[in-house]
Amino acid sequence: MHTIYLDHAATTPMDPRVVEVMQPYFIDVAGNPSSFHTVGLRAKEAVTEARQTIARLLSAREDEILFTSGGTESDNLAVMGIVKAQRQAILSFCHSRAGGNPSDGSPGLRFATPEDDKKPHVMTSAIEHHAVLEPLLHLQKIGEIELTVLPVNREGLVAIKDVRTALKLSTVLVSIMFANNEIGTIEPIADIGREILAWRKEHITPYPLFHTDACQAAGAIELNVEKLHVDLLTMNGSKIYGPKGVGILYIRRGIKIEPLMRGGGQERNIRSGTENVPAIVGLAKAFELVQENRETENARLIKLRDRLAEGLLKIPKTRFNGHPTDRLPNCVNISFMDIEGEAAMLYLDAQGIMISTGSACASSSLDPSHVILATGLSYEAAHGSLRFSLGHSTTKEDVDFVIAVMPKIVERLRQMSPVNLDMKYFN
Ligand SMILES: *Cc1c(COP(=O)(O)O)cnc(C)c1O
């Protein structure tokens, strides 16, 4: 049976060109970049070159790129590392401003709430990946931070005015994802960045720092840290046809961050552990390739994406999730009322079609997705939400096949749903 893989938001297969450039670093050039012999130095060179490539693509500097084990580690490092490293500094800063009537003309107490000098404040959105939400909820639970979770609208957008309203002198970090992994909505990161810059200027403060999780965006959108006005940015290999288990955290020069991992002092002491050389080489190549082909591939995918959405929305009692246009070119998320998403997923699997309910990481639990719920859908509707995420291998024939089989599957499942069974029983 022909496999139709429509789960690229969970992870992408690797681009053969990426596999090819990784190959030498498994056996022939398998040195440790910290070793001073020839093989070690060649491995080190490869890591340096990868860092240069990524820095160029992000419009960043080499020493601002840190290699990690993936999106999850980069997000955790951004959140935990910034809160820990900046805690004292921001509390002293709030304290100094709370003195009132500063002679240098900087704003005084009127900008601070009574809580402002007690705990660092962090702001995030309700639709973040668990790799951002969980560390933040943990820090909140152990009393380390005050947390604001911003709502999103029906289309999954964060409102810039909500960011502005929630900012305070004690806000140390704002973390808003670039593109959502379940509904594909693209957040106005550059606008939020500008808002934060304006706030810093107005209040004469280096805070808050601005982090974005760009794992899903990296394959489809230009990532320029200057244009986006971000201080920290997460991306990984597994969503851009690169290797799994490798990622980067961009950290703007001069920003202090506390390591999660201590040891041999690799990655400027911020991330100890022997570098995963083949994966790092592969990540750089993958990022280069997706960015090079971004515009042609986006145009191709958008056509397929819209064809698929249109076809599936002809099925009665369906609802589109996400933003109609400010959305990733490969993402279609639809709620099918009165069906169980997991059951539909298995029926599609039997037809060779691989899709996902909610996010892959969360789908081992049967709880509906926090993202779909945050867009205001009922628990029941959220349960019947399916994510189709397209990619390099997707063809028009694949899309048409899905459009052809889906109505039968939905009809079958609806007949089996408790609502209909009950009706039959009582008729
Ligand atoms: C996949 C993903 C992650 C996690 O990345 P890993 O490399 O699997 O740890 C984090 N954030 C987003 C938005 C993702 O899509």
Image (cartoon, rainbow, N blue to C red):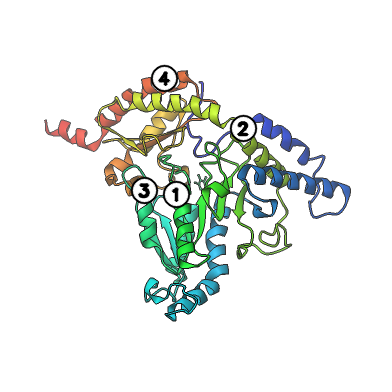
Q: Residues within 10 Å of mark 4 (few under 14, many from 20)?
A: some
Could you tell which of marks 3 and 4 lies nearer the N-terminus?
Answer: 3
Q: Residues within 10 Å of mark 2 (few under 14, many from 20)?
A: few
Q: Which marked residue is nearer to the observer: mark 4 or mark 1?
A: 1
Does residue 6 appear in this view? Answer: yes
Q: Residue 367 has which mark?
A: 3
Q: Is mark 4 within 8 Å of ligand 1?
A: no
Q: What residue would you read off at disc 1?
A: 191
Q: Which kind of residue does numbered mark 1 sit on?
A: Asp
Q: What is the residue that sits farthest to the left in this orientation?
A: 427
Quote the CA–CA distance across marks 3 and 4. Answer: 30 Å
Quote the CA–CA distance across marks 3 and 2. Answer: 38 Å
Q: Residue 122 has which mark?
A: none
Q: Residues within 10 Å of mark 1 (few under 14, many from 20)?
A: some
Could you tell which of marks 4 and 2 lies nearer the N-terminus?
Answer: 2
The spot of residue 9 in percent (x, y) is 49, 38
Q: Is there CB contact under 8 Å for labels 1 and 2?
A: no
Q: Residue 400 has which mark?
A: 4
Residue for point 46% across, 76% down = 97
Quote the CA–CA distance across marks 4 and 1. Answer: 38 Å
Quote the CA–CA distance across marks 4 and 2. Answer: 28 Å
Question: Tag 3's secondary structure?
Answer: loop
Q: Is residue 264 above or below residue 362?
A: below
Q: Which quarter of the picture shows residue 184?
A: top left
Q: Which kind of residue does numbered mark 3 sit on?
A: Asp
Q: What is the residue that sits farthest to the right in this orientation?
A: 37
Q: Is residue 386 above or below residue 270?
A: above
Could you tell which of marks 1 and 2 lies nearer the N-terminus?
Answer: 1
Question: Tag 4's secondary structure?
Answer: helix
Residue nearer the viewer, 105 or 299? 105
Q: Which kind of residue does numbered mark 2 sit on?
A: Glu
Q: Residue 292 has which mark?
A: 2
